[in-house]
Amino acid sequence: MSRDTPLDPADRGLVEDTFYLTEGIEVSQWLLPTAKGVAFRAAYLAVGIKVDQGGKLYGTPQRSGTYVAPVQLCAGQLCSAQELTLVVLGNVPWEPRELTFPGSVGRPLRGEIGINGGPAGVVPTFTVTDHAKLPQDVTIGPDGHVGGVPAAPGISEVPVRVCVAGNCAGVVVRLIVV
């Protein structure tokens, strides 16, 4: 029974233990445990950031810096701690670039959504928010790579959420296939 199985402190109990956040931008992220039936002990993690029993990180970071705090993962009455690292970066403005990609039916589409600005050393993430808007056989990856071989001509406007250290914005990527 999982409620009686202790969590092994030698094991990593979380899929991800480092989070990049932006000072002054509200946080709403989830800790993902590697085992089923895990709960968390609610705790204060950094200036303005807390975790609840469900593993939700929430709040608004108030000071930039790197914060390392133990998070208690519990299965039944047994708990173990894992260190969580929160890197809070200053709010550095950024903007997207390369949002229009031309292509031809039957030919590989190659491109990459990029950003200008943002904190140094932080890799942005890209999430398609409506996959039905993507042309058949075309993808936009979490790294901003636009690829695939378009099957039909047309113009597609694909909504994409771009995040840089928790500072997110929606953009529209235009794919023009002839």
Image (tube, rainbow, N blue to C red):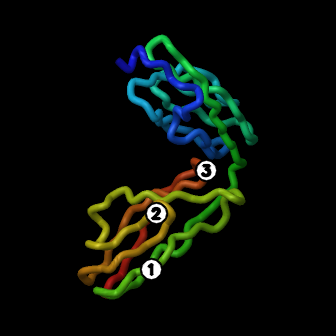
Q: Which residue is mark 2?
A: 171
Q: Which residue is mark 3?
A: 165
Query: Badge 3: few (under 14), some or many (20 or more) residues near its Cα, within 10 Å?
Result: many
Q: Quadrant of the N terminus?
A: top left
Q: Pick whichever, 168 or 7, lies toward us.
A: 7
Query: What amino acid does circle 2 point to?
Result: Val
Which label lies toward us, 1 or 2?
A: 1
* Residue 55 drawn at (x, y percent): 49, 29
* Residue 125 drawn at (x, y percent): 52, 57
Q: Earlier in the sequence, mark 1 or mark 2?
A: 1
Q: Residue furthest top?
A: 77
Query: What amino acid does circle 3 point to?
Result: Ala
Query: What amino acid does circle 1 point to?
Result: Arg
Q: Pick whichever, 114 or 73, lies toward us.
A: 73
* SS at circle 2: strand
Which label lies toward us, 1 or 3?
A: 1
Residue 11 lies, with reference to residue 174, above or below; the image says: above
Horizontal arrangement in the rendering, residue 69 relative to residue 102 (left or right): right
* Residue 32 drawn at (x, y percent): 47, 36
Q: Residue at x 25, y 80 (%)?
A: 151
Horizontal arrangement in the rendering, residue 31 relative to residue 137 (left or right): right
Q: Which mark is residue 110?
A: 1
Q: Quadrant of the C terminus?
A: bottom left
Query: Badge 2: few (under 14), some or many (20 or more) residues near its Cα, within 10 Å?
Result: some
Residue 108 lies, with reference to residue 139, above or below; the image says: below
- Quarter residue 42 falls in: top right
Q: Which mark is residue 166?
A: none
Residue 34 lies, with reference to residue 178, above or below; the image says: above
Q: Residue at x 48, y 73 (%)?
A: 99
* SS at circle 3: loop
Q: Residue at x 53, y 52 (%)?
A: 168
Residue 149 lies, with reference to residue 123, above or below; the image says: below
